[in-house]
């Protein structure tokens, strides 16, 4: 599936995006959401590449941003301001002003103080800012601790015990309009039970808010749908049908209410691979190492979360296999992509693909060790 011969002329390491798969995936998500009239705001933080963003905005996706720079990027790549949700626990004043000036769909607010600040900034401009309350529903996403966001112990969102109080206060703030309640319980969620539990919580909270005289036009259940890191070829497109059917079965929307979600990883993960080259093979008594030219600066997920990515040697295969630790060149022991990987016997110069790297890969790259940032190439351009 990889154009290995063409890769020979490209400078490794680099990200390679399968554009046909990307389109297929985005289209699948969109059609499944449209069955129920749901709206998807693509979460830019998973991958903010301009080419991919332009494709998504052209297809009719909305955007979910977590910084002013992401809001700018979404606007410059064709997303309409009224499709932009802006989340994050620490929005700066200049970032808020940018959103107010463009009249974005919603500021997803995470504290009472943030609401007060947005109200003041909107007042100074004579504007009314549309806000959502990001509610921390205390639902366990059963995923990695570093990417769980919906528990009381997490820094995110407004806790349940404050909710009614905060909702009533927002109604008093003259330059805010409460349009939405927002949730996001975590990422790489591979069972549907956390989503079912979230829906039940949303239903319960809607009831409580209504009793307190608070109604909203929109409900946003965030992102989090996981992908299959073990079997990228077999499960190249995530289970969007089951995901949206689960939401539809369990959420009770009020008449006229619109459901939104913010998928990131599931839209973009499988279409991206990090392509790297074997620099050295170290065969020691107890271990064999393949030292590649990509490092944690190009893809930090294994070092940061202990995340698994399938590694393939994509050079025309040799029959004999060997077990290797695949490591990068960075001066950190955590710069290891995987241990005890069975690969065809590998040699200096072999090309390798680290799969399912389209989400939270290129966007997290750093210049540690003064390395160059990895470039991106696309299947329809190489
Ligand atoms: C990160 C994030 C998302 C996207 O999560 P995925 O797991 O990539 O789908 C959506 N909403 C918010 C608020 C986020 O922080």
Image (tube, helix red, strand yellow):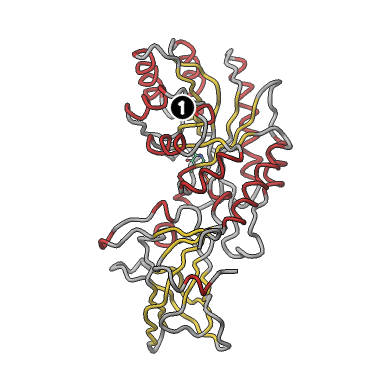
- Residue 295, percent from left and from top: 37, 66
Give me the residue at 59% from left, 53% from top. Answer: 22
- The image quadrant where one finds the N terminus is bottom right
Q: Nearer the viewer, residue 85 or 49?
A: 49
Q: Nearer the viewer, residue 178 or 31?
A: 31
- Residue 3, percent from left and from top: 55, 70
* Residue at the limit of the structure toward the left, as seen here: 370
From the viewer's perspective, tell me whether residue 15 is left or right of residue 209. left
228 lies above or below 287: above
* Residue assigned mark 1: 107
Give me the residue at 71% from left, 35% from top. Answer: 250
Q: Nearer the viewer, residue 346 or 205?
A: 346
14 lies above or below 113: below
Give me the residue at 40% from left, 59% from top. Answer: 375
358 lies above or below 354: above
For numbered disc 1, what is the local secondary structure?
strand
- Residue 186, percent from left and from top: 52, 44
Give me the residue at 32% from left, 28% from top. Answer: 94
- Residue 5, percent from left and from top: 51, 74
């Amino acid at each position: 599936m990889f154009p290995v011969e063409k890769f020979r002329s490209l400078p490794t390491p680099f990200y390679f995006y399968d554009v046909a798969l990307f389109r297929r995936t985005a289209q699948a998500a969109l059609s499944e959401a449209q069955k129920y009239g749901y709206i998807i705001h693509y979460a830019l933080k998973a991958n903010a590449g301009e080419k991919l963003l332009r494709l998504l905005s052209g297809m009719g996706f909305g955007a979910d941003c977590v910084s002013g720079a992401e809001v700018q990027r979404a606007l410059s790549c064709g997303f309409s301001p009224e499709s932009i949700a802006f989340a994050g626990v620490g929005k700066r004043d200049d970032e808020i002003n940018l959103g107010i000036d463009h009249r974005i769909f919603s500021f997803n607010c995470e504290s009472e103080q943030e609401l007060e600040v947005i109200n003041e900034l909107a007042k100074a401009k004579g504007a009314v800012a549309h806000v959502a309350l990001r509610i921390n529903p205390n639902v366990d996403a059963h995923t990695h601790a570093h990417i769980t966001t919906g528990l009381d112990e997490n820094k995110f969102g407004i806790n349940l015990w404050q909710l009614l109080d905060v909702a009533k206060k927002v109604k008093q703030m003259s330059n805010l309009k409460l349009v939405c309640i927002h949730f996001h319980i975590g990422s790489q969620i591979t069972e549907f039970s956390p989503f079912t539990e979230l829906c039940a919580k949303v239903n319960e909270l809607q009831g409580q808010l209504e009793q307190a005289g608070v109604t909203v036009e929109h409900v946003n259940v965030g992102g989090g749908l996981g992908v299959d890191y073990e079997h990228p070829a077999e499960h190249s497109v995530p289970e969007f049908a089951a995901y949206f059917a689960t939401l539809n079965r369990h959420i009770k929307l009020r008449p006229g209410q619109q459901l939104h979600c913010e998928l990131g990883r599931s839209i973009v993960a499988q279409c991206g691979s990090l392509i790297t080259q074997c620099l050295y093979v170290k065969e020691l008594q107890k271990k064999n190492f393949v030292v590649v030219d990509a490092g944690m600066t190009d893809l930090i997920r294994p070092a940061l979360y202990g995340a698994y990515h399938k590694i393939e040697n994509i050079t025309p295969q040799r029959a004999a296999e060997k077990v290797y630790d695949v490591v990068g060149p960075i001066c950190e022991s955590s710069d290891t992509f995987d241990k005890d990987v069975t690969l065809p016997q590998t040699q200096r110069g072999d090309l390798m693909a680290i799969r399912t790297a389209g989400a939270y890969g290129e966007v997290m790259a750093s210049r540690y060790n003064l390395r160059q940032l990895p470039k991106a190439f696309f299947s329809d351009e190489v």
